[in-house]
Image (tube, rainbow, N blue to C red):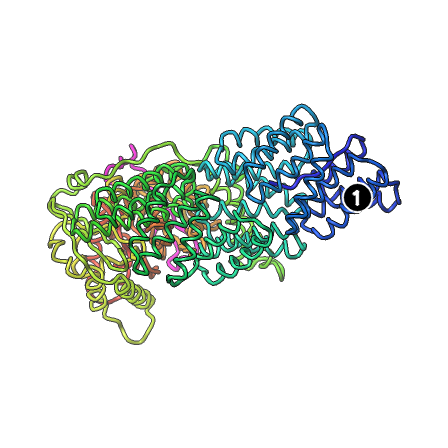
Amino acid sequence: MSATSDDIEQPSTDELLTLALARPNEALAAARAILAEHPGPARAAVAHQAVGVVLRDFGNISDAIAELRAAARWARAARDHDRETDVLASLGVALVMSGRTRAGLSTLERAVRAADGQLTGRVLIRRVYVLWSLGRYAEALDDAQRAVDLLADGDAVWAARAYQHRAALLLAMGDTTRADRDYARCGALYAQAQQDLEYASARQERGATAFARGDMPVALAHLDDAERIVEKLGVFDAGLYVTKTTVLLAAGLHRDALTTVEYALARISEHRGSATQRSELLHCAALAAHAAGKSETARAHAREALRAFRQQQRPWWAARTELVFLQAQEHPGDGLLRRARRLSRQLDVLDPEQAISAHLLTARTAFAVGKPAVGRSHLRAAAAGRPSGLSGRVSACLAQALLAEAEGRHRAMLGACARGLRQLDAYLRTLGATELRVLASAQGSDLATLALRHAVERADARQVLQWSERWRAAALAVPQVRPPDDTPTADRDLAALRSLVSRLEEGAGPPGTPGTLQRDRRRLEDAIRRRALLAPGSAGSTARFRIRDLLAELGSATTLLELIDLDGQLIAVVVRSHRVRLHRVGPTAEAARSLAHALFALRREGGRRGVHRLDLGVIGARLEADLLGGAVPLLGDDGSIVVIPTGRLHAVPWGLLPSLRDRPTSVMPSAAAWLRSRRAAPPPDAKVVLVGGPKLSTGTAEIQALSSLYPRAEVLAHGAATAERVMAAIDGAHLVHIAAHGTFRADSPLFSALELDDGPLTVYDLERLRRAPHRVVLSSCNSAVGAPAGADELVGVVTSLIGLGAAGMVASVVPVNDPATVPFMSTVHQHLKEGCPPGEALARARGESGTHETVTRTVAEAFIALGS
């Protein structure tokens, strides 16, 4: 909620004080121009008040207080009782914002007693803001209701302010429906009165309301609108950054949140801003640092904010900040337990939703220091919570599950885990952005891990598989959201980004141009990403995974191997011949080290680097031992293999493993995704598209070779492989082959791309397809590489196409040698044309490439098949 300003009956005063919150820079200039003319007492009072209000809301609190005290003196000199009362109200707000809470409340009380009629309503609004910021909601709501009754039929701006302040109280008390209604009213009134800054404030708070009811895309859209308006006005609004940081953290965008709040802290320090707002920003900075894994920074910010909140007599804020401070402690002990128990009792009264997290922290600390009875009592308190927000509901379910586990009630524990994951299922369907869905999946990790741990301890292979699938690749299980038809802005931004990247790579332009182009690139990427985050979710439901459906589809000819990383140990579930078996492999870290070694070897041998040849056979055997261990005999020695790896082990060159080299092997993020790929109907026509990108050392040799296999294919090469033409051609095609260099962006995986003639074709581009190609072959370097994120999710080019509905793919896990790739791809396509699924086509081509450790063999090992 923004601090409010002022108004009296004379038209000139109305204009100046209204301008202070609509266009503050103009108001400041106008008021100072008036003061330069040495006006009479009445006009000086108004001008000083306008300056004070603008400076206060800019964060220059000490100067604002001086101006408002001057305004009060001039109002007394003019014997204008109403003006003096109004100024006192503005001064009271400024004093509280400076950290002088008692003096501010006392000044506001004097103003309330001195006012009558509509002026009383205006003064009450200022006190509502202060009481709200202090967390004294019941008192504030009484004042807000009185203000609405007094002002609803009067001046439009003040009526809007009354509705806005009442909305903020309703939101704080959990009534999002009534709050949103009040925000809609005040927003319309502000727009009508051209009160731009206050309109932005209402927009920001409406975003907070959407967030509170779980509508993340709408929340982000409102906040983006508010930020654009504020930036245009040249105003710094600390409250906007507090809200935005909170929403970004809830969305799992921890890096964005930390960047946002650090920027806001720097700005408020420059402006010598409000002590109350700075402490709120410090609280948010502590939250963001803790979420980003920067515990020491989190503790430092929380410690400073906690001191400030206690000095400002703000117990609600102080308790929430102490919770962050305790959560950021790295070593549990009796001292932490004492503080956590005390804080849990405080939050039970001050903030029942946050109390759930406090009780969970207390319980875990108690168990860690050997006090299980204390731990169980706090789990009961957390489990009994009835929070309104998603995070609180998931935490309550986790507390119920942990309590049931501690009491040996395993069926109740699994039920609580299932309830929590259902909450997240519903939430994921509200999100249209891949990035948000992936990050949100992390909220289910504790629940899924708890259930999985129980199943592994019982050695129940079926239950392990069921719970592994319950939250594996959850983002891909949500129906993809197709872009709306009217998206010319998105198309223009993506085209502009391609042009910029091409110019950067070519080094075009005069000296100094690259720096400008890089800034433009960041701006465009931010705009593309921000637009994607605002996409609404799909109403579609997700199909339930059933083991019996998997067994029926696998039959007796296909074996499924699912790898699970649980508490740092690799667990293998093997489904073969209608049996489900479990095997403990060993440390995940050992498998990850062997994988890194194998990928290094493939890159080195493929690039013909190094004097001494590496023995890929030995390296593959070591990788198999660490990755599969004693599970190898469970795979049998015939039939095809479907592998479901963990996100950390997604880029395994499966053909390098001795047991799998000659067997058709395909990879998928989950068994449920594999089932969907098996059921995907091919398009009615047999359209084939061949795409040849630029800068390949073999030129168009690969595409020319494949053209002889597919004489009726649509060929885009020789400069014709532009993004627009490629996207139009591959949409819904039966088979697509793209021979183009690929880039993987670890910093922003959705900007990973395939290089076309007019620049990079990113994941954001691919997600605009109406229908994915049925099968895709990507002969580019690293095309199968993705970024692990969320709860064992993967983000990259391949997973994007799988999510859109591609049934089968071939892609590489390391850079490949272009000349050696040409004949190998021809062989793969000969088998695809014969009707072989990708895994079988790749295995046959690999077998025909020979067993000698040559560049040809490394190319064969670099590719993996996905889907069916």
Q: Is residue 680 above or below residue 781?
A: above
582 vs 706, left or right, is left
| In magenta segment, residue 697 | yes
Q: Quadrant of residue 110?
A: top right
Residue 271 belongs to the span the image colors magenta: no
- Indicate the quadrant containing the C terminus: top left, top right, bottom left or bottom right: top left
User: In this orientation, which residue lies closer to the viewer: 722 or 464?
Assistant: 464
Q: Which residue is mark 1?
A: 71
Query: Looking at the picture, which amino acid does disc 1 mark?
Result: Ala
**Residue nearest the observer in this picture, 610 or 622:** 622
Report x, y in % for residue 108: 68, 41
Q: Is residue 447 above or below residue 210?
A: below
In the shown orientation, is residue 141 left or right of residue 765? right
x and y percentages locating residue 281 in the rendered image? 56, 52
Query: Which image quadrant: the N terminus?
Result: top right
Hey, which residue is sitting farthest top in the picture?
A: 153
The reply to whether residue 57 is visible in this rendering is: no
Q: Is residue 858 above or below residue 472?
A: below
Q: Is residue 269 left or right of residue 766?
A: right
* Residue 385 in view in this figure: yes
Left or right, 351 with reference to 158? left
Q: Which residues are magenta?
A: 678-705
